[in-house]
Amino acid sequence: MWIGRRQAPGQAARSSGPDLIYVGRSRLHRNRANLIQTVNTCSALLDCGVAVELQLPPWHGLDVRARLVDLGARADLNVRAYRLLHRRWAPRWFVLLHRRRLLGKALYTRNPELSLAMAKAGVGHSMEVHQVEALRDAGQLSSLIRFHRE
């Protein structure tokens, strides 16, 4: 689902940096299906020639390259830690602090809270939707659909 504008009015797309920024809230040291899906999606995109930057909450004492290989992903995947992606922080703080860097980039997330924060800040992005019923029950589905339609 595409949410937001392709490009902010009057803003030129930036040529430097990654082709795609994948923003997630999965913890790199945890063995969760969401994390495995995320790193393998980014790895597959990298295989296709897409320069991907995966942004995740911070980790401590972890050999990132070995961990990526352990999860079945490429060791050379560009993974960056952002403290405000940790679940203890509301997603809006990450978006507000990094909004300029995110604008004009191809953004992707699977996280509805991040998606809503980006949409409210006017940051266009794509969101992979799973568990539609859970989104509806959490009161997020109607907002996501409204932002998508806008």
Image (tube, rainbow, N blue to C red):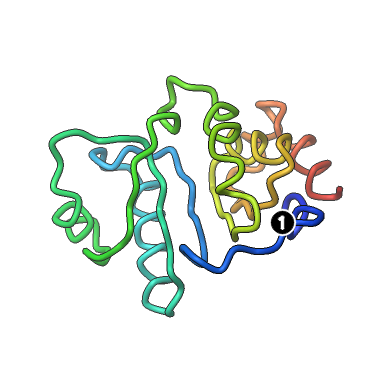
| Residue 146 falls in image quadrant | top right
Which one is in front, 57 or 135?
57
The quarter in which the N terminus is drawn is: bottom right
Residue 23, position as x, y percentages in the image: 49, 47
Q: Amino acid at mark 1?
A: Trp
Instruction: Give the residue at x 64% y 51%.
Output: 103
Instruction: Give the residue at x 79% y 43%.
Output: 147
Which one is in front, 32 or 127?
127
Q: Of all residues shown, which one is farthest toward the bottom?
A: 48
- Quickly name the residue at label 1: 2
Give neighbour class at mark 1: few <14, some 14-19, many 20+ (Cα, 10 Å).
some
Instruction: Give the residue at x 71% y 36%.
Output: 121
Vertical placement of 113 versus 23: above or below?
Answer: above
Instruction: Give the residue at x 26% y 67%.
Output: 74
| Residue 59 falls in image quadrant | top left
Residue 76, position as x, y percentages in the image: 25, 65
Residue 123, position as x, y percentages in the image: 68, 46
Vertical placement of 103 versus 20: above or below?
Answer: above
Instruction: Report the side of 120 relative to 131 (left or right).
Output: right
Residue 111, position as x, y percentages in the image: 54, 41
SS state under label 1: strand
Vertical placement of 13 versus 134: above or below?
Answer: below
